């Protein structure tokens, strides 16, 4: 594993990484797989159901990014696709599940992506005026964004322990086209993680301190880690 990680690590200064446990999975966020035409309905319903239950939460018109980030955090389908600045965290997600299938690690050059999609190689936080409209669009059935098929790389802004522990970044998708099918030169690279190596890599990652509770930092996942360590079934969680 050391040689594989060393090769990825050399790119960490400019690259973002995403680990998929099934190499056939497309780079398409959850809402764009099945729920594109119900995105605004889903987003607005979440807001109306939870506004009074999240302490000190902003009104939707004040902060669309807050509510989109909350949806992502709680596992609802959104237009956000998770990336990480850590190749080891990407490898963890590539080998953690689907042991019988080849996994993969995607390597993204976010500056090349943005230059191709919005005409600048700069990276902005999600709440920047440059890209805020892409979050706003998730809550509206009318067209807000001129670049209808744009996919933009952006920094996470949520001050959440999970975002920090996973070194999270995002691509925000205003397109139903998977990122890899955009065919942008110099933007993406895919490394296959063979199924036969998954268990060995997973064991080595655990030995290196990459544990479930340390990556997610939620009480739920810490409980799963404790269960796995005591019962000896962490691989099945």
Image (cartoon, rainbow, N blue to C red):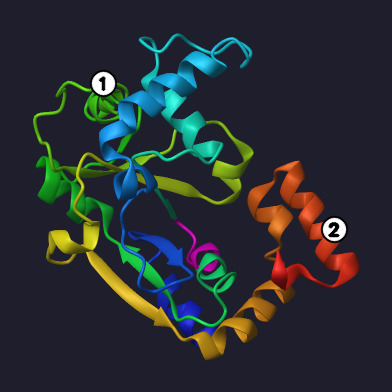
Q: In terms of depth relative to the viewer, which is nearer, 48 or 117?
A: 48
Q: In terms of depth relative to the viewer, which is nearer, 78 or 105?
A: 78
Q: Which residue is mark 2?
A: 226
Q: In terms of depth relative to the viewer, which is nearer, 123 or 57?
A: 57
Residue 196: where, in percent of width, then height? 54, 90
Q: Residue at x 35, y 49 (%)?
A: 29
Q: Quadrant of the N terminus?
A: bottom right
Residue 150: where, in percent of width, then height? 16, 42
Left or right, 100 with respect to 188, comes to right
Q: Residue at x 31, y 58 (%)?
A: 27
Circle 1 Cα neighbour tier, 10 Å, few/some/many (<14 / 14–19 / ≥20)? some
Residue 8: where, in percent of width, then height? 42, 74
Residue 130: where, in percent of width, then height? 21, 28
Q: CA distance from mark 2 to mark 1?
A: 42 Å
Q: Quadrant of the C terminus?
A: bottom right
Magenta span main SS: helix
Label located before the other in sequence (2 or 1): 1
Exactly how many numbered labels are in the figure? 2
Secondary structure category for the residue under label 2? helix
Q: Residue at x 56, y 51 (%)?
A: 166
Report if residue 87 lies within the magenta region.
yes
Q: Which residue is mark 1?
A: 140
In magenta, the rendered stretch is 85-90
């Amino acid at each position: 594993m050391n040689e594989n990680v060393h090769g990825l690590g050399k790119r960490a200064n400019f690259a973002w990484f995403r680990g998929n446990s099934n190499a056939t999975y497309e780079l398409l966020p959850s809402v764009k797989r099945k729920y594109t035409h119900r995105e605004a309905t889903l987003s607005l319903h979440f807001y109306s159901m939870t506004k009074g239950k999240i302490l000190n939460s902003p009104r939707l018109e004040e902060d669309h990014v807050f509510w989109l980030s909350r949806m992502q955090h709680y596992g609802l389908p959104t237009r956000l696709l998770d990336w990480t600045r850590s190749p080891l965290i990407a490898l963890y997600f590539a080998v953690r599940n689907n042991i019988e299938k080849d996994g993969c690690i995607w390597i993204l050059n976010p500056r090349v992506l943005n230059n191709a999609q919005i005409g600048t190689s700069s990276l902005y936080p999600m709440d920047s005026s440059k890209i805020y409209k892409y979050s706003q669009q998730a809550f509206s059935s009318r067209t807000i964004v001129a670049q209808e098929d744009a996919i933009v790389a952006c920094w996470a802004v949520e001050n959440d322990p999970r975002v920090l522990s996973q070194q999270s970044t995002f691509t925000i998708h205003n397109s139903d086209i998977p990122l890899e099918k955009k065919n942008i030169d110099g933007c993406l690279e895919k490394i296959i993680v063979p199924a036969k190596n998954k268990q060995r890599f997973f064991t080595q990652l655990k030995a290196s301190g990459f544990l479930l509770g340390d990556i997610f930092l939620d009480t739920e996942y810490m409980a799963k880690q404790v269960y796995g360590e005591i019962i000896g079934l962490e691989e099945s969680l």
